[in-house]
């Protein structure tokens, strides 16, 4: 099975921001059965992000305010080279900028690396105060960024969007028209807040964070479902996938591959092995012969 | 379903062990949480949160059904805030996390350095409680003021050794030098180490020469403590220290090129140790 | 403790759409410890709503596509009279219209009844196809509706809003300025989809529905938190409250009372008794003497 | 945590019991769901979904570890679709929901009417299986074609009575008339009823005259089946039939003013029965 021209061994993609700082942890995900990995979102300069606590669990998932911690694009791309020396499994480099122009500058650097794909993180809801509203809420800014990246890159790139935009499907379509080669749907839902009732204080140091995990799965499934009907490019369906059955839902509504983030919290990094097994068990008992036949199944008949 | 609940606990007691080194004892408040108590194992750690300030990992120093304690050095914002805590204040913790020292029979050497000694103290108590042979213990610090738990170690074994960098008490030199001396005189079956990483690293190299297996507790910058942020990962194996450590065996450490050399800082950038 | 001038015995409010068709079921909630109840949203004419299945559970909550089933305002108000003959516990009549003008017409009818309050349901995400986008996403339409209702009513009314509006806080403030006496935050999050993987079909007959339950709690808590800072009027904090501790979070961020919907699914209609007990147990062990002291606690110091 | 999982089951068999009356047997497909099987009690129901058509409640007619069956009358869209089901097709169900008939010793009278007879059949089997006394059974229908399970009832008891509205077989008259005759001749300790609500209501009034406690299964328009939509609520007590019914006792029914008179339709409007 190929994804944007590259062979993938499984539909599971390590989502951005989960263990994706070092080549070693991404290689581990691949050894454990991930078909593809995404780096932590990289910016032009290193960022410490927010102070801990950066995660607060609730009944249904996580709220996180990591705040885009990353060692910067240069050190990040060194990890990409280390990674590519060890495996053919595709790697997606996630990038984000403070200004619209930053994206093209970052994309150019990634384009010169051994990375397979780029992902534009337009939607991280954890740095609003600093960066004003996320770009992903504004269809025109998204269009502008995508067009600028399209002009400077030769490797395919995906656009990652926020479920906070009521018009997310229109935005995804607009991005496609401006040159995006695929969509990663969805980023965390913003914002969530968890209160410690004994001290009457927010648990997160940054007070609030993006919501991920099983809680957002039906939202992600609906968005991927609708996007599949409008888009001609592949979708990395991401949001709350924790079991093989969740992944099957995601594929059936139209995801080409399936992003896995918070499930690593619940089931450890070898969740990829478990997901592969669960998916294969289903395929074996079904009329299907390969997981790719599940893609978009809900839209048939 | 909450996988890792947070527990709000009451401060029972805070005492200054040495200059800038404090021990806090916390009590479980039954009604506060689904978890009524836990008993941690030597080597495990908790994430301790001071509201409005931050959350950092600390080794558990003592753990019984009703309470637990940790020792810390005042070095930054969270430990600064912790040093100001008063009895009856509330602290929120989560854990216990991570791997533990595995107790084994035979001639054990325990090495603790500076404010990383707490897990060694807890291990020594556990060995005694479970009726293992008396271990040999090395306790090392910069100066005599920083030699933690001397009296207790003295009670726990007859083979208790101290070392100070400045020679202000006992052996003049560091833990590794003292260890080297001991190894020429005695045979050990296993070595347990908790201390500054450079010290631990050289102690490990020494043990490797003699073919003695070690269990060593490491520290890395830990933001999440639960295996998702990636800040504590060790190269090149991708070992996730907050989950698969902090206690690592010699077999594991042999494959960790970062050990004693490199770590990732707050941004994830690689730095020399 | 008074809510908009009426005495309430507990902070718990039966949320709209849960058992709120008949006086008898609402009286039951009151007997079980609810301080206040909300009717099912009523329209000018009866509506059958969507066909079953109208609920699809996922790991974290429900998706529902009830589709605003209701016997119409006239029969609905008869139930209100039956209810008020039996209890003093306040009743909120939820109304919704197809057109902007419907709201004032409905509100006039409620104003003549024995109802204590009105709630404008501007945000039901289950009837979009029929009614185009929910009013709650459009700040100007919300303002218009609120102003029109304000002109024809003498009893206080609340505005219920949708978390799908990225500017929900601005909308709530605008509604307040136009005459709304309080805000009910939040309605279900739209839209969620649950797929049956054995048939590759959406579980809900209507394919998708609004998301409720624990999954949306951190989102609701954050919205109530932010609204409390901006509004001068009371908030019915609603979304995912399932335990006494959840209610305490909601009060602490600024809810005056706490809406309870999906918890009835998980814990039965006597959930109100359980919530009261759990809340009181906390109060007894704390430095507080009454639950009203918890309101807005997070914003102190 | 899913509170009420849906189960996708395979159709083993479908047979026409009478004109427009069908029985479907379903088998559990082990891999499909966390629930590997359940055994329902007489009186309980399941929600059965035909994808793309709808979901409706049906009484369980037979339930063992490996399979379960229900009987239905073709009257609307879902039952229309169900009547077209073929073996090996998949159906999704949830449940079992609701209260059951409580088995008791003594002289029991069981009354089933029309296509609501399935719970009575299941109850009769259960009484036999658990070694209770042979009950007296009344089975009533409009015409003889609609008398379900005659042969089985005949085997389950020696006191089996039939009634048809048109007199096409056995007693000429309805279930209540036949019951009235029986009550003048025999003493019963308990009466179990499942049938059209008017019939059940008049049977209940008759039983009240004699002071005989009943358990009666009622039907209401049920949209959710799990106690939240409110469409099945009975006045004035606010009883939630899908959870606290469908089987109700005489004590409960005495307080239900709606019983035999009013119900709520699809919109929640009150209608006469
Ligand atoms: C598993 C584990 C167990 C620990 N147990 C103890 C203990 O029992 N007692 C104790 O005092 N400390 C312990 N530490 C270290 C402790 O977590 C740090 O000292 C803590 O970060 C101090 O927080 P702060 O906010 O006061 O200082 P910060 O402002 O966070 O740190 C001050 C300085 O220390 C550096 N630093 C902080 N944490 C680390 C780290 N983990 N590795 C390398 N450099 C770091 C920072 O970069 C900075 O330069 C442990 C760490 C780990 C990972
Ligand atoms: C607890 C319970 C157990 C049941 N068990 C059985 C059973 O074992 N076998 C069986 O055939 N049926 C049973 N029913 C009734 C069955 O659910 C309805 O016949 C079903 O709605 C038919 O669905 P449909 O889509 O084919 O028809 P619809 O189009 O839904 O209905 C056709 C007509 O029947 C009316 N109607 C539907 N359901 C009800 C109801 N519950 N009460 C009053 N009027 C109704 C409708 O208003 C309409 O006029 C049971 C109902 C309940 C509540
Ligand atoms: C701790 C954490 C950190 C994340 N960091 C990033 C990030 O840096 N860039 C990004 O595009 N998404 C980031 N995400 C979002 C995930 O990639 C993913 O889109 C989201 O969590 C939904 O998927 P999940 O439910 O499987 O976690 C992060 C999520 C979590 C939980
Ligand atoms: C089955 C169901 C039906 C609902 N119907 C309505 C409705 O008619 N009007 C309305 O304003 N909200 C309706 N809601 C939304 C709830 O009132 C509430 O705002 C939402 O479910 C979030 O709260 P919860 O998580 O406690 O359920 C409905 C919710 C559910 C689950
Ligand atoms: S501290 Fe986050 S992965 Fe270990
Ligand atoms: S059917 Fe919905 S409450 Fe009973």
Image: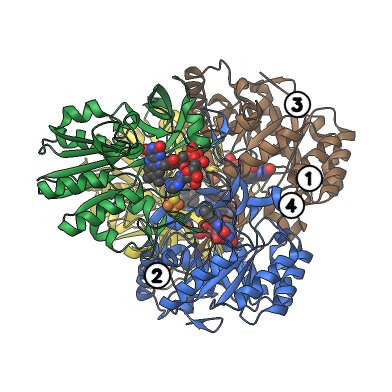
Chain colours: A blue, B green, C brown, D yellow
- Residue at 42% x, 68% y is D90
Looking at the rendered image, the disc whose residue lies closer to the viewer, 4 or 2, is 4
Secondary structure under tag 4 reads loop
Tag 3 near tag 1, CB within 8 Å: no
Looking at the rendered image, the disc whose residue lies closer to the viewer, 2 or 3, is 2
Residues at marks 4 and 3, CA–CA distance in whole angstroms: 47 Å
Instruction: State the residue position of label 3.
Output: C114
Which of B200 and C255 lies nearest the eye of the viewer? B200
Residues at marks 4 and 1, CA–CA distance in whole angstroms: 43 Å
Return the disc, 4 or 2, that comes first in the chain's sequence.
Answer: 4
Instruction: State the residue position of label 2.
Output: A279
Discs 1 and 2 share one subunit: no
Instruction: State the residue position of label 1.
Output: C44
> Does the beta carbon at disc 3 come under 8 Å from ligand 4?
no
Discs 4 and 2 share one subunit: yes
Q: Position of residue C11 (x, y in %)?
A: 61, 26
Which of C250 and B77 lies nearest the eye of the viewer? B77
Which of A273 and A77 lies nearest the eye of the viewer? A77
Q: In terms of image quadrants, where is residue D22?
A: bottom left
Circle 4: is it few (<14), some (14-19), or many (20+) Cα within 10 Å?
few
| On screen, residue A285 above or below D225 | below
Instruction: State the residue position of label 4.
Output: A132
Looking at the rendered image, the disc whose residue lies closer to the viewer, 1 or 2, is 2
Residues at marks 2 and 3, CA–CA distance in whole angstroms: 57 Å
Tag 4 near tag 3, CB within 8 Å: no
């Amino acid at each position: 099975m190929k994804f944007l021209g590259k062979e993938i061994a499984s539909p599971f993609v390590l989502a951005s921001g989960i263990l994706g700082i070092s080549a070693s942890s991404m290689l581990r995900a691949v050894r454990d059965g991930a078909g593809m990995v995404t780096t932590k979102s990289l910016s032009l300069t290193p960022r410490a992000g927010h102070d801990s606590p950066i995660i607060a669990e609730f009944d249904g998932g996580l709220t996180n305010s990591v705040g885009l911690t990353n060692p910067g694009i240069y050190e990040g791309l060194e990890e990409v080279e280390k990674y590519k020396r060890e495996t053919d499994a595709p790697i997606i480099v996630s990038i984000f900028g403070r200004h619209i122009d930053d994206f093209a500058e970052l994309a150019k650097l990634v384009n010169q690396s051994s990375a397979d794909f780029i992902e534009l993180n337009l939607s991280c809801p954890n740095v609003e105060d600093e960066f004003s509203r996320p770009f992903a809420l504004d269809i025109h800014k998204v269009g502008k960024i995508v067009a600028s990246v399209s002009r400077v890159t030769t490797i395919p790139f995906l656009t990652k969007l926020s479920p906070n935009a009521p018009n997310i499907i229109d935005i995804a379509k607009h991005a496609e028209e401006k040159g995006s080669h695929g969509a990663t749907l969805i980023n965390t839902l913003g914002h969530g807040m968890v209160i410690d009732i004994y001290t009457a204080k927010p648990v997160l140091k940054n007070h609030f964070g993006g919501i991920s995990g099983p809680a957002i799965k039906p939202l992600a499934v609906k968005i991927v479902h609708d996007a599949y009907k409008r888009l001609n490019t592949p979708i990395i369906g991401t949001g709350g996938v924790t079991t093989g059955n969740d992944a099957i839902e995601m594929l059936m509504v139209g995801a080409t591959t399936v992003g896995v983030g918070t499930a690593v919290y619940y089931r450890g990094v070898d969740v990829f092995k478990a997901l592969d097994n669960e998916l294969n068990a289903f395929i074996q008992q079904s009329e299907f012969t390969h997981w790719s036949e599940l893609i978009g199944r809900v839209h048939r008949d | 379903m909450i996988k890792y609940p947070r527990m709000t606990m009451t401060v029972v007691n805070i005492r200054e062990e040495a200059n800038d080194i404090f021990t806090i004892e916390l009590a479980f408040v039954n009604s506060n949480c689904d978890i009524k108590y836990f008993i941690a194992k030597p080597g495990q750690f908790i994430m301790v949160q001071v509201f409005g300030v931050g959350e950092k990992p600390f080794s558990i120093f003592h753990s019984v059904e009703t309470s637990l304690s940790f020792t810390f050095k005042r070095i930054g914002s969270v430990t600064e805030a912790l040093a100001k805590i008063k009895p009856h204040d509330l602290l929120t913790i989560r854990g216990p996390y991570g791997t533990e020292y595995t107790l084994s029979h035979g001639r054990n050497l325990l090495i603790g350095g500076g404010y990383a000694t707490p897990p060694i103290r807890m291990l020594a108590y556990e060995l005694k409680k479970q009726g293992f042979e008396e271990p040999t213990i090395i306790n090392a610090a910069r100066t005599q003021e920083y030699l933690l738990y001397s009296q207790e170690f003295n009670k726990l074994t007859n083979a208790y050794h101290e070392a100070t960098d400045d020679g202000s008490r006992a052996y003049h030199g560091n833990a590794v030098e003292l260890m080297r001396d001991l190894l020429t005189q005695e045979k050990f079956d296993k070595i347990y180490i908790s201390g500054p990483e450079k010290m631990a690293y050289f102690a490990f190299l020494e043990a490797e020469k003699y073919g003695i297996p070690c269990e060593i507790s490491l520290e890395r910058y830990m933001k999440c403590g639960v295996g998702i942020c990636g800040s504590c990962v060790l190269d090149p194996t991708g070992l996730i220290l907050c989950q698969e450590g902090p206690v690592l065996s010699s077999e594991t450490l042999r494959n960790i090129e970062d050990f004693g050399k490199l770590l990732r800082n707050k941004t994830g950038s690689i730095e020399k140790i």
